């Protein structure tokens, strides 16, 4: 079954957010922003994606800003979120397999659109490996 995915960006990630939404026929929960012209603050959008995933409204989140870094820092402040900024498909695969990452962060200024689509596809299709990785992922919650 295709996952429900929450997606948000600041103004610096708006165009890539729209491109991703148009490219995958899955159920999106779009949490803004709504245009590239109005300057907004990435923490608000990182928190919104984190909350949607943590509360089970969406299985995964995608958060886009200029670099993917600021919005990822924001998302990772939620104890139930494991947000990973990825610039290639290997990172996307490994962060799903090893970290059970539930939020993918992308930087519109850093990667091309085709690379972004491959990253999203890999992230959404790769399963968590569990086993020794489960013990480590559980330890992430112990420190919160
Ligand atoms: C906005 O100008 C920019 O700072 C933001 O999109 C992001 O790159 C922050 O990490």
Image: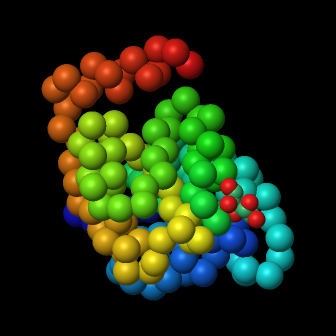
Residue sitting at x 21%, y 48% = 127
Where residue 57 appears, as percent x and y from the top left, is 49, 52
Where residue 10 appears, as percent x and y from the top left, is 70, 66
Q: Quadrant of ligand 1?
A: bottom right
The scheme the figure's colours follow is rainbow
Q: Is residue 15 visible?
A: yes
Residue 79 sits in quarter: top right
Q: Is residue 51 visible?
A: no
Q: Is residue 65 left or right of residue 143?
A: right
Residue sitting at x 73%, y 80% = 36
Give above or below for 9 relative to 133: below
Residue sitting at x 44%, y 80% = 113
Give above or below for 28 relative to 54: below
- Image quadrant where one finds the N terminus: bottom left
Pick out the residue farthest to the front.
Answer: 110
Where residue 68 appears, as percent x and y from the top left, is 57, 57
Observer-nearest residue: 111 or 17?
111
Where residue 73 appears, as percent x and y from the top left, is 62, 43
- Image quadrant where one finds the C terminus: top right
In the rendered picture of this protein, how many numbered marks are placed on residues? 0
Residue 108 sits in quarter: bottom right
Pick out the residue farthest to the top.
Answer: 142
Residue sitting at x 41%, y 72% = 116
């Amino acid at each position: 079954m295709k996952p429900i995915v929450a997606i948000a960006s600041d103004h610096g990630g708006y165009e890539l957010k729209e491109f991703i939404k148009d490219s995958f026929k899955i159920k999106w929960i779009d949490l803004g922003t709504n245009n590239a012209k109005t300057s907004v603050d990435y923490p608000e959008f990182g928190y919104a994606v984190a909350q949607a995933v943590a509360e089970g409204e969406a299985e995964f989140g995608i958060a886009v800003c200029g670099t993917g870094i600021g919005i990822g820092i924001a998302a990772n402040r939620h104890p139930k979120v494991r947000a990973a900024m990825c610039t290639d498909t290997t990172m996307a695969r490994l962060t799903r397999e090893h970290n059970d990452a539930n939020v993918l962060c992308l930087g519109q200024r850093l990667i091309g659109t085709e690379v972004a689509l491959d990253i999203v596809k890999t992230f959404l299709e790769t399963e968590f490996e569990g086993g020794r990785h489960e013990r480590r992922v559980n330890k992430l919650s112990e420190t919160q």
